């Protein structure tokens, strides 16, 4: 392997730069489609809990899948995994090699996310790395599904992989694959691993075509110029903001082990064209799995900032080059080994992005968007399948379908929050074919979205009826600290977690569900909170409030209570005279 960093030649013309950038983004998209169509488990084939990207030989993020399935929370972290591979195998990377890594203290985010990278060589020179990061359903932790709320050290969270060579010059190392298979409870692991490999090989093949057309020099300088363009645009935006320090803070209800109100504090320091994100003042490291690895914290910060900048800016290494990050040692945002971290991509990751958004409200409230996941961990249902006797394990993305907040100009959208990007809810019929339960309800709940000039999305209620004995794990958070409204908007609703539905043992869980037994005929329900509203609810167009009532997002009572919109007796029109009078009266009372 040759890793030379020559002085870049003059950049190609702007059109060629864009063509190469677009080609590499399309490569990542094609990798993503390959993964989706060849993976075995529904978390990939249905919910798309994976991401694809192209990195260079300096571990820089060059391109990522943007039009297909991808999780933004993966992207900022993936470069640290590639960096770890390059460090571990410096001078020993060959054509046909494939590397695998998941350890949070070797560039990973959490153990379930396996990152696979495969080099592209041209005439013996290393050029680019297609990379796939995918959430494996089980990695051998003390709890099936690898979200282990009782874990107090990372060895209890599953098999730790520093960078390893899973393919040696084109040949799969079956000894390592057998070792990995032995350390997972699920028989589908090999199929999903091969899907990752297929995606990487597609990336290698397409990039080789690009190199043969343009040559290494042109591609490298085009990548440099694409990043430089992003740097210039980001710095120009930052320079337009007033200098100052802007503060925000978000809270996690608990860690499952008695620590409550775990805070992430964020100070955005704007100085000219530089932005520093300082997380000093965040909660000290805790015993449980809500600590964040360094890579995960970086990813959530850049995700939050990228969302609030011009969407036309390419999502590449430019964000790393323009934004400084200060992480306090021994804290939940920068955990020390061997602290457990498995929940970090959800929480405390969601609170990191949320705190950045709250701080950003002081700079540009019309751009501020609190993207978060008030979930603690994906809801895990597992047991012996009644038809096969094999272990089934479901970590469906429907337990992350809430909290989508409004932004200036747009109501919150249905489904998963921006934090989870292009992920989708699994098809109910497919889920029922694979797992021994029925989805009895999956619906939006009226009056749960935060009121505002633009309304937060309603929360989602999902009820599953159990057909076979199983166990359930979940973390009941988002009750004390729902998503906050912005610029005068109302907060979203809180989460609710109910087990034993339809039986005398039905109860609402307050903190943690761990190995909760469910019997046939019972069920479980989770009602996920709504998103926060944006702006004064009294400024919402009354006709839009009427539409919300007719669509079932807001009740008639909620329209009058939260928006001061009065409907006619038949509920089909706005009583404009009473609405004007009520809004005028209550605005006056608020002004006193």
Image (tube, helix red, strand yellow):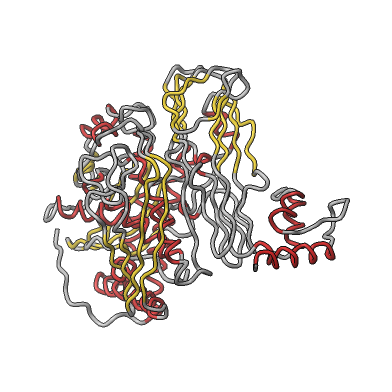
- Give the residue displayed 73% in from the left and 61% down from the top: 544
Res. 103 in view: yes
Q: Quadrant of the C terminus?
A: bottom right
Res. 213 in view: no
Q: Left or right: 531 with respect to 124?
A: right
Q: Residue furthest left?
A: 91
Image quadrant of residue 153? top left
- Give the residue displayed 47% in from the left and 36% down from the top: 476
Q: Residue furthest front?
A: 592
Image quadrant of residue 512? top left
Q: Quadrant of the N terminus?
A: bottom left
Residue 83, x across and y down, in percent: 22, 56
Residue 452, x across and y down, in percent: 63, 60
Is 411 rendered above or below residue 272?
Answer: above
Is 199 rendered above or below residue 429?
Answer: below
Residue nearest the viewer, comparing 32 with 294 = 294
Residue nearest the viewer, comparing 512 with 580 = 580
Residue 255, x across and y down, in percent: 37, 38
Residue nearest the viewer, comparing 509 with 400 = 509
Q: Left or right: 86 with respect to 430?
A: left
Badge count: 0
Q: Residue furthest right?
A: 569
Is 356 rendered above or below residue 467?
Answer: below
- Give the residue displayed 57% in from the left and 38% down from the top: 527
Is 459 rendered above or below residue 380?
Answer: below
- Give the residue displayed 62% in from the left and 51% down from the top: 449
Image quadrant of residue 161? top left
Residue 20, x across and y down, in percent: 37, 70
């Amino acid at each position: 392997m040759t890793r030379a960093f020559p002085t870049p030649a003059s950049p190609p013309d702007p059109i060629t730069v864009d063509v190469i950038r677009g080609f590499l983004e399309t490569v990542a998209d094609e990798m993503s489609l390959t993964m989706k169509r060849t993976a075995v488990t529904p978390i990939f084939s249905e919910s798309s809990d994976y991401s694809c990207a192209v990195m260079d030989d300096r571990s820089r993020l060059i391109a990522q899948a943007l039009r297909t399935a991808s999780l933004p929370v993966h992207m900022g972290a993936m470069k640290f995994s590639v960096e770890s591979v390059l460090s571990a195998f410096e001078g020993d990377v060959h054509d046909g090699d494939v590397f695998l890594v998941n350890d949070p203290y070797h560039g990973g985010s959490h153990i379930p996310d396996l990152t696979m990278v495969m080099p592209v060589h041209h005439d013996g020179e290393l050029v680019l790395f297609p990379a796939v990061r995918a959430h494996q359903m089980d990695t051998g932790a003390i709890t099936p599904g690898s979200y282990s709320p009782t874990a107090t050290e990372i060895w209890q969270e599953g098999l730790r992989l520093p960078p390893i060579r899973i393919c040696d010059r084109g040949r799969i190392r079956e000894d390592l694959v057998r070792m990995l298979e032995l350390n997972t409870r699920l028989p589908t692991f090999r199929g999903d691993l091969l899907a990752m490999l297929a995606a990487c090989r597609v990336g290698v093949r397409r990039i080789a075509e690009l190199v043969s057309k343009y040559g290494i020099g042109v591609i490298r300088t085009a990548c440099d110029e694409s990043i430089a363009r992003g740097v210039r645009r980001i710095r120009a935006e930052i320079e337009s903001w007033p200098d100052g320090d802007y503060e925000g803070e978000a809270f996690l209800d608990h860690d499952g082990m008695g620590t409550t109100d775990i805070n992430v504090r964020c100070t955005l320091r704007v100085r000219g064209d530089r932005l520093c994100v300082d997380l000093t003042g965040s909660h000290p490291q805790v015993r449980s799995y809500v600590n964040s690895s360094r890579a995960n914290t970086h990813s959530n910060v850049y995700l939050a900032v990228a969302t609030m900048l011009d969407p036309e800016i390419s999502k590449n290494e430019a964000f790393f080059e323009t934004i400084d990050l200060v992480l306090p040692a021994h804290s939940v945002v920068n955990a020390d080994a061997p602290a457990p971290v498995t929940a970090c991509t959800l929480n405390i990751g969601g609170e990191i992005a949320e705190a950045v958004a709250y701080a950003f409200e002081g700079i540009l409230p019309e751009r501020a968007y609190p993207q978060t996941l008030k979930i603690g961990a994906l809801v895990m249902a597992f047991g012996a399948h009644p038809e096969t006797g094999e272990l089934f394990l479901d970590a469906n993305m429907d337990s992350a379908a809430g909290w989508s907040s409004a932004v200036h100009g747009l109501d919150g959208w249905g489904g998963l929050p921006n934090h989870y990007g292009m992920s989708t809810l699994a098809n109910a019929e497919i889920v029922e074919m694979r797992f021994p339960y029925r989805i009895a309800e999956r619906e939006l709940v009226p009056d749960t979205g935060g009121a505002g000039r633009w309304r937060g999305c309603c929360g989602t209620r999902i009820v599953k009826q159990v057909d076979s004995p199983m166990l359930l794990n979940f973390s009941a958070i988002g009750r004390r600290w729902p998503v906050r409204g912005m610029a005068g908007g109302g907060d979203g609703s809180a989460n609710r977690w109910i087990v034993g539905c339809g039986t005398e043992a039905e109860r609402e869980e307050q903190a943690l569900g761990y190995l909760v037994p469910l019997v046939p005929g019972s069920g479980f329900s989770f009602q996920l909170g709504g998103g926060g509203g944006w702006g004064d609810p009294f400024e919402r167009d009354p006709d839009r409030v009427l539409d919300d009532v007719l669509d079932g997002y807001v009740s008639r009572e909620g329209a009058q209570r939260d928006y001061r919109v009065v409907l006619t007796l038949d509920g089909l029109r706005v009583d404009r005279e009473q609405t004007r009078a009520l809004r005028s009266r209550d605005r006056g009372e608020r002004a006193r």
